Amino acid sequence: RMQLLCCSMPAHLGQKVISFEIGPFPSAANQSTHTPRIAVPSGTDEDTRAAQHFRKLLDETTEALSNNSKLQWVHIPKAGTSFGNLLVQAKCPGLFRSVRLEDLPLGFDDAFSKRMHQFSQEQRRMAGQCMSLFTRWGFHEPVDTHRGKIVTVVREPMSRIVSGYLYRFIGCKPMIHKYGVRSFKKDAPKKLRKLQHLYWDEVMEMDNNEFVTFVRENYAEGGAGILAYAKCVEGSQASILSGFGRDHQNKSGLVEAALQTLNEQVVFVGITDRWHETASLFLSLFGSNTTLTKESDTNVRPSIVTDNSLKNDVLDTLLQSGFHDLADEAVYAKAVEKFETLQQAARLEKRSHSRQTV
């Protein structure tokens, strides 16, 4: 089990500090392969309309997640790379059973981008078939509204910002370049270009211990502090889901577009802070006989900083600064609403099925 950063909703949203863990995931009960149908309960007209709404939502979701539909996985930085393992296990179970995840340090996300050569010929064939089920696989790129339905995971903004800061300033190129916590290969000294790198185009000049020391000395204030990073990556989730990208200047238009994407194109949204529920809900909506295994129960992008007291100090500093990521807070609130609506639909189906089998 891995204890992750204790996260907090901003005070003006009326939430208290919460903590969460990723793993081990709960095992979902085996599901039948048919599309779930919610029986309309007797009751008031309002109850009937609500049940019909949930039935329609569940039918549309399970159909979109079926193998007959192609999906784009929109990957928000520090919001759930591990979701890639879940996608492969659900949609490509043969490949998942064939590949040892412990041989793929960053899971299937890493395998499909850089480590395909480690697969056997038969595994590469299965991987090609698996990738044909997706119009986009991960990567930290804005939504493409022409690539079909979307699956994604969203994270509470302050928690995501702190996690990104502690992961070598991910997503903030000005700070990365200025302080040398990462180097892009084309800019790195020649001797470093031969080193193993974690990303497509990056190598690490500062080792993990040096980076932790750097954070400890600089997080509280100044250009390398958490507040500077927060301002640099503000609105990142909204930027990605809007399709506009980080350079878009119209913040109000950005939020409106991101909310429209969530409403109209996202068929499944998970919540990082509620990972157990996310995994269970995904499998139940997918309608397969797949259950999570110990091999897939891993956080593939854990924090570089393992000192929980330092993590909490960084978070406290950000909260006490009064900073709010209004764009991402709006996106997160809508994502939670959509997630909980799907949960309610799934629970209603489960109760209905239980009544029918008694």
Image: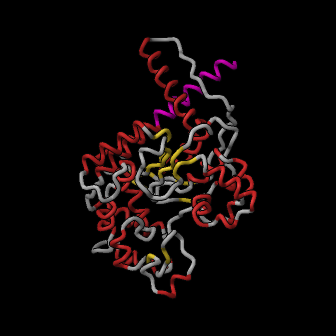
Look at the image and tell me whether residue 308 can be seen.
Answer: yes
Is 44 drawn above or below residue 282 in the view shown?
above
Look at the image and tell me whether residue 306 can be seen.
Answer: no
Is 319 drawn above or below residue 46 in the view shown?
below
Question: Secondary structure of the magenta portion, mostly?
Answer: helix
Q: Is residue 342 magenta?
A: yes
Give coordinates of residue 348: x percent, y percent: 55, 25
**What residue do we see at 52% from left, 30% from top?**
60
User: Which image quadrant for residue 69?
Assistant: top right
Q: Quadrant of the N terminus?
A: bottom right
Seen in the image, is 76 located left or right of residue 112?
Answer: left
Give coordinates of residue 279: x percent, y percent: 58, 45
Q: Residue furthest bottom?
A: 191
Scheme of image coloration: secondary structure
**What residue do we see at 53% from left, 63% from top?**
301
Seen in the image, is 18 located left or right of residue 221?
Answer: right
User: Which image quadrant for residue 49?
Assistant: top left
27 and 122: which is toward the camera: 122
**What residue do we see at 72% from left, 60% from top?**
100
- Which range is magenta? 340-358
Give coordinates of residue 274: x percent, y percent: 50, 47
Q: Is residue 24 magenta?
A: no
**What residue do we see at 69% from left, 18% from top?**
358
150 and 308: which is toward the camera: 150
Give coordinates of residue 117: x percent, y percent: 67, 67
